[in-house]
Image (tube, rainbow, N blue to C red):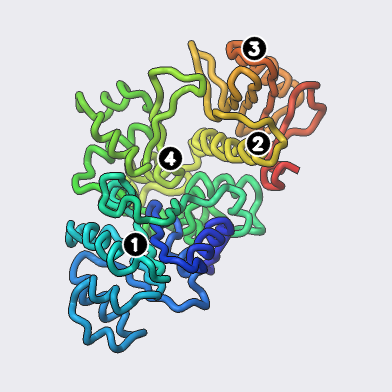
Amino acid sequence: MVAKFIDRSSELEALQRILESPRFELAIIYGRRRVGKTRLVLQALKGKRYIYYLAVESGNLERFRRTASKLIPELRYVREDWEAYFHFLKDWVIVIDEFPNLIAEDKTVVSLFQKIVDTVLHGTKTKLLLVGSSVSMMKNAVLSYKSPLYGRRTAQLKIGPLPFTALREFFPSTSPRELVEIYGFADGIPYYLEKVETPFWEWLDRELRDPKSFLRYEGDFLLRYEFEDTGTYKRILEAIASGKTRLGEIKGFVGKSSITEYLKNLMEVELIEHVKPVTGGRRGVYRIKDNFTRFWFRYIYPYLSEIELGIYGAEDVKKSYDDYLRMTYEKIALQFIAQLIRRGELPAVKKLGPWWSKGEEIDIVGLNGRKTGIFVEVKWSSLSPRKLERIYESLVAKASHIDVDERIYVVVCRSYTGPVPPGLRVYTLQDILRGGG
């Protein structure tokens, strides 16, 4: 697939404001690997004078000078020192990609950059963009209040996956159902979306049977970027991907009496989240945040031996994929409901998320204190009028446990044709792809 630059207008505008500022700017740009940070930055830099440097594990001072000297030959005569480089490069746009590699090479580099900002760059028109994929290191070493750079940054951008609706631009002739199937695999992560070919199932089968496919090693690669010892983290993610989402269930699967620190670290790097009922409560469940990680730990990691032997293919994934897509569709529905709220088509809420209590659960609930409640049931299926009526009745009964003055009932399903009961709103996959209209 040809590389595309899609649906990053707000991030691009933010970066362009930084680049066009008349003052010194220190922008921190971070997000998980594969999410498209570098491409976003380079897109914003088109037509501008800049130095781009991709940091590596060692030798960065010399490598940076060699890179920058291609644009400024005189820099090769400057002494090998970050402070000397920046004295020479004042008023340039300087991008240091994978800044965590500089930190790993030299722990003092953050303090050194703080000194450079304070004594060399302050008061100039220099734009310094520090980009990083190690979410934990960027948070702790660069963004944390304990960081020497704390208070020096003028902007920060966290780059996340694209929304589901962006997949239409990657796959303009693909059916709505296949878009959901692809999203269940790739999420909104450009790197994976650009690897997918359609028909999706034929492509996936080829990848599963290809000894050189990125699929075999990708999950392990992502973890090793954040953690040295990945064994327990893999078991935890495999447990959650298989449906064991409560602490006790995960402990039993992993076989460790204490996994709190591991869970904390996985949340720190934003691979998992701890979800509680929207009305509050002490106990929650753990969920994998992005679809690709969930897919890999459900359908790839447990079957690496079978994949190696060539006896595992797309048909094996297909057997349970509709069940897997139920949670995927809930994620899509949550994006859609949030969009309707932002547009004013549903009332503003202060909380939005799942609800459960005493064996009852509602997929999405939006609450504005006790004033308004939005109650949403999500079904990855095509509904008949009779099924819709039963779902509506059940939703009303479950919503009665939450005390609000105004109640709005919504069903989001794959498809529906027929009358809609008074007091209920129904949205389909086609509505989501049309933006609700």
Helix, strand or loop under label 4 = loop
For mark 1, give the secondary structure. Answer: loop
Task: Give the mark nearest the N terminus, 4 or 3.
Answer: 4
Among the two numbered marks 2 and 4 on one chain, the one whose residue lies closer to the N terminus: 4
Residue 19 percent coordinates (x, y): 48, 67
Distance from the alpha carbon under mark 1 to that under mark 4? 27 Å
Name the kind of residue labelled 2 in the image: Ile
Instruction: Please tell me whether mark 1 or mark 4 is closer to you in this view.
Output: 4
The amino acid at mark 4 is: Lys
Q: Nearer the viewer, residue 406 or 274?
A: 406
For the residue labelled by badge 2, is the local secondary structure a helix, a strand or a loop?
helix
**Label 1, on which residue?**
212
Earlier along the polypeptide chain: callout 1 or callout 4?
1
Residue labelled with disc 2 = 341
Q: Which mark is residue 370?
A: none
Q: Which disc is residue 289 wearing?
A: 4
- Of tags 2 and 4, the one toward the viewer is 2
Residue 397 - label: 3
**Horizontal placement of 299 versus 176: left or right?**
left
Question: Which circle, 3 or 1, is nearer the viewer?
Answer: 3
Compute the Cα span from label 2 to label 3: 24 Å
